[in-house]
């Protein structure tokens, strides 16, 4: 059931954004002397009123609202309260309408991307275990698959905790109970008592989805103390629509947090990640030293652009939930068409049935084709796979040219 997400006309979108900007403090009209913020420099950036009057996102960029802090927790910087309310509406769409959280039972913010959102989650859980279980840092471990994003390694480095990676099946990209158990037992042998588990909602290279039930069943079998984070940086705006029976939502009691990237499938400006977590957890990273920030700061990034939150809200509001389902359905059909054509050519590939990523075996594609069509390798030094991502601009006609090229080279 849709709670907050409705399709809006362009006029409704414009009015909402412009009214929100009016609620923010005007640096031209109000003597705001104490904050290190202002509009974009008018000597450099076009702020012609006739232009901005028809461009809500560009107006937001020009007004330059700072959305520092976490606006789901009560007080925030009151100078930007108007546009903060749009960010809260965006979070409601993502948390409640897409990820099936209960309204008011989550916290979150618009981050700089999925990498930050993943690190934020791991940071929170590390501190949670240290605070609630008196855990030592060397007793805490990140557990994820070999196909997980490199942000897990970044998090392990930054937060000074170890990371254990579970092997996946080379053909299916799936985790098995045996390999999960093997890695967890090794971690326990190494003295690990607390586990930060990352479950993938479409991996970066393969678009594969981890079976959360395999992970949680094994964790419970071994009596592991764990928190589980879903990395939906790629899949967050795709998989819940391609697979309506997804268990990677807040309806699953094991899911504590989710990362999404609006700058991938939602086509928002780069720097628009989204972090959602259950109530009661984000406080473990409250930076109390940020006492000059109204409402304090629970985020990793600190200051951040309100314009990016507005852009993502505009996009989702323009489509509405039904329009978004249709968008994903079109991409699904294009991806299925590509796979059928590859099968006709006996080209080996991997694709999750709910994904728009098709990964081709490197032995079945030549260097010239890779260069001509911008295929991305799993490893630039010794590639085993090359991926195709069926995005909005990847129309059938473009894919057809790739198929023609592959056909010609195999004759």
Image: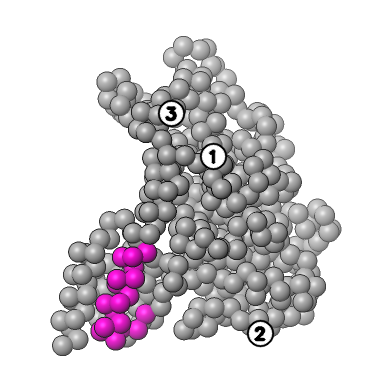
Q: Residue at x 37, y 74 (%)?
A: 359
Position in image of residue 299 (x %, y %): 61, 44
SS type, badge 3? helix
Q: Which residue is mark 1?
A: 4
Q: Residue at x 68, y 83 (%)?
A: 182
**Picture layout, residue 313 above or below residue 226:** above
Query: Residue 43 falls in which quadrant of the image?
Result: top left
Quadrant position of the C terminus in the picture: bottom left
The magenta span reads 332-349
Q: Which residue is mark 2?
A: 178
SS type, badge 2? helix
Question: Left of 149 or right of it: where is 41?
Answer: left
Position in image of residue 69 (x %, y %): 61, 37
Question: Which residue occupies the extreme front position in the image?
Answer: 1
Q: Nearer the viewer, residue 339 or 49?
A: 339
Q: Residue at x 54, y 16 (%)?
A: 33
Position in image of residue 352 (x %, y %): 45, 72
Query: Residue 256 falls in which quadrant of the image?
Result: bottom right
- Residue 272 belongs to magenta span: no
How dense is the environment of label 1, judged by Cα within 10 Å: few (below 14), some, or many (20 and up)? some
How dense is the environment of label 2, judged by Cα within 10 Å: few (below 14), some, or many (20 and up)? few
Position in image of residue 243 (x %, y %): 49, 63
> Mark 3 or 2 closer to N-term?
3
**Residue depth check, mark 3 versus mark 1: number of the one nearer the observer:** 1
Q: How many marks?
A: 3
Q: CA distance from mark 2 to mark 1?
A: 42 Å
Q: Which residue is mark 3?
A: 17
| Residue 156 numbered mark, or none | none
Q: Are marks 2 and 1 in contact (CB under 8 Å)?
A: no
Q: CA distance from mark 3 to mark 1?
A: 17 Å
Q: Residue at x 26, y 73 (%)?
A: 370
């Amino acid at each position: 059931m849709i709670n907050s997400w409705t399709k809006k006309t362009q006029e409704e979108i414009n009015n909402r954004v412009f009214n929100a900007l009016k609620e923010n403090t005007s640096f031209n009209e109000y003597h705001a002397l104490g904050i290190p913020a202002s509009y974009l420099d008018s000597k450099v950036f076009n702020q012609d009123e006739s232009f901005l009057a028809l461009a809500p996102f560009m107006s937001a960029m020009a007004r330059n609202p700072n959305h520092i802090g976490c606006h789901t927790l009560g007080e925030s910087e009151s100078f930007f309260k108007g546009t903060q309310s749009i960010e809260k509406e965006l979070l409601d769409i993502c948390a409640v309408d897409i990820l099936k959280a209960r309204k008011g039972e989550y916290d979150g913010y618009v981050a700089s991307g999925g990498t930050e959102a993943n690190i934020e989650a791991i940071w929170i859980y590390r501190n949670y275990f240290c605070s609630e279980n008196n855990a030592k840092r060397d007793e805490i471990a990140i557990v994820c698959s070999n196909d997980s994003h490199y942000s897990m390694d970044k998090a392990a480095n930054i937060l000074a905790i170890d990371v254990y990676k579970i092997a996946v099946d080379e053909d299916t990209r799936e985790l098995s109970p045996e390999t999960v158990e093997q890695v967890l037992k090794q971690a326990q042998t190494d003295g690990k008592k607390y586990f930060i588990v990352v479950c993938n909602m479409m991996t970066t290279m393969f678009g594969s989805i981890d079976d959360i039930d395999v992970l949680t069943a094994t964790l419970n079998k071994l009596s592991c103390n764990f928190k589980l984070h879903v990395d939906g940086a790629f899949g967050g705006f795709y998989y819940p629509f391609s697979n309506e029976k997804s268990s990677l939502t807040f309806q699953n009691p094991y899911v504590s947090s989710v990362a999404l990237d609006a700058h991938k499938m939602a086509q928002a400006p780069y720097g628009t990640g989204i972090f959602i977590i259950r109530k009661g957890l984000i406080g473990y990273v409250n930076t109390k030293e940020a006492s000059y920030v109204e409402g304090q700061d629970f985020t990793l990034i600190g200051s951040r652009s309100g314009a990016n939150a507005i852009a993502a809200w505009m996009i989702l509001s323009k489509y509405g939930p039904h329009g978004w389902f249709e968008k994903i359905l079109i991409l699904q059909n294009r991806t299925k068409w590509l796979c059928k054509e590859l099968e006709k050519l006996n080209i080996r590939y991997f694709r999750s049935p709910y994904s728009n990523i098709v990964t081709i075996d490197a032995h079945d594609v030549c260097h010239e084709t890779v260069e001509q069509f911008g295929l991305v390798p799993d490893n630039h030094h010794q590639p085993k796979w090359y991926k195709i991502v069926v995005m909005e601009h990847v129309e059938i006609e473009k894919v057809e040219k790739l198929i023609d090229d592959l056909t010609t080279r195999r004759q």
